[in-house]
Image: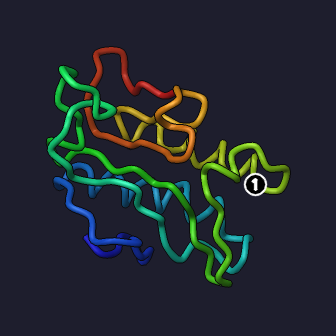
Amino acid sequence: MRSVAGVTLSETAVMDCRTAKSLKDWLVSTAKPALANSGGGLAALGVAAHYSCRTRNNQPGAKISEHGKGRAIDISAFHLADGRTISVLNGWDAGGTRNAMRLLHRGACGPFGTVLGPDADRYHLDHFHFDTARHSNGSYCR
């Protein structure tokens, strides 16, 4: 994928069809509306990771990550039409972007089965992890 719902990806991303559809749904229902009044709107996503055959958090002996199954994408930044960038690392707790970042994170719960962000753990301080794993109790969002 190079773009989804009119939003460019910073690098070509490999993912399965369910993940691509979930990304489209989240962009249309949450991300584009959340940033519509910021810098001319959302133009591109900063992709930190997509398909990569590896274990969870690159830890030896861990289970295969959803990235290794083509069912995950990590987003590190939101590029606006006016050229500004809001990074997850700097925007998560910044006064002018905190509310939008929380909305972007919360809105991914549902389209995606797992949503992890800066409050999840030390591995996700600088990006949002979205994957389409299914959990018995619904979406897992931290």
Q: In the orientation shown, which residue stands out farthest toward the right?
A: 95
Q: Residues within 10 Å of mark 1 (few under 14, many from 20)?
A: some
Q: Residue 3's spot in the image, x, y percent?
A: 34, 74
Residue at left offset 83%, top offset 56% = 96
Q: Residue at label 1?
A: 97
Snapshot quadrant of residue 67: top left
Residue at left offset 44%, top offset 35% = 115
Q: Residue 35's spot in the image, x, y percent?
A: 66, 65
| Of 6 and 13, the residue lying toward us | 13
Q: Residue 132's spot in the image, x, y percent?
A: 28, 39
Determine whether, in the image, residue 118 is placed left or right of residue 14.
Answer: right
| Of 88 and 29, the residue lying toward us | 88
Snapshot quadrant of residue 47: bottom left
| Of 136 and 94, the residue lying toward us | 94
Q: Is residue 45 above or below residue 96?
A: below
Residue at left offset 28%, top offset 56% = 21
Determine whether, in the image, residue 35 is placed left or right of residue 22.
Answer: right
Q: Is residue 5 above or below residue 14?
A: below
Snapshot quadrant of residue 40: bottom right
Q: In the orientation shown, which residue stands out farthest toward the front?
A: 60
Q: Is residue 36 above or below residue 69?
A: below
Determine whether, in the image, residue 82 is placed left or right of residue 50.
Answer: right
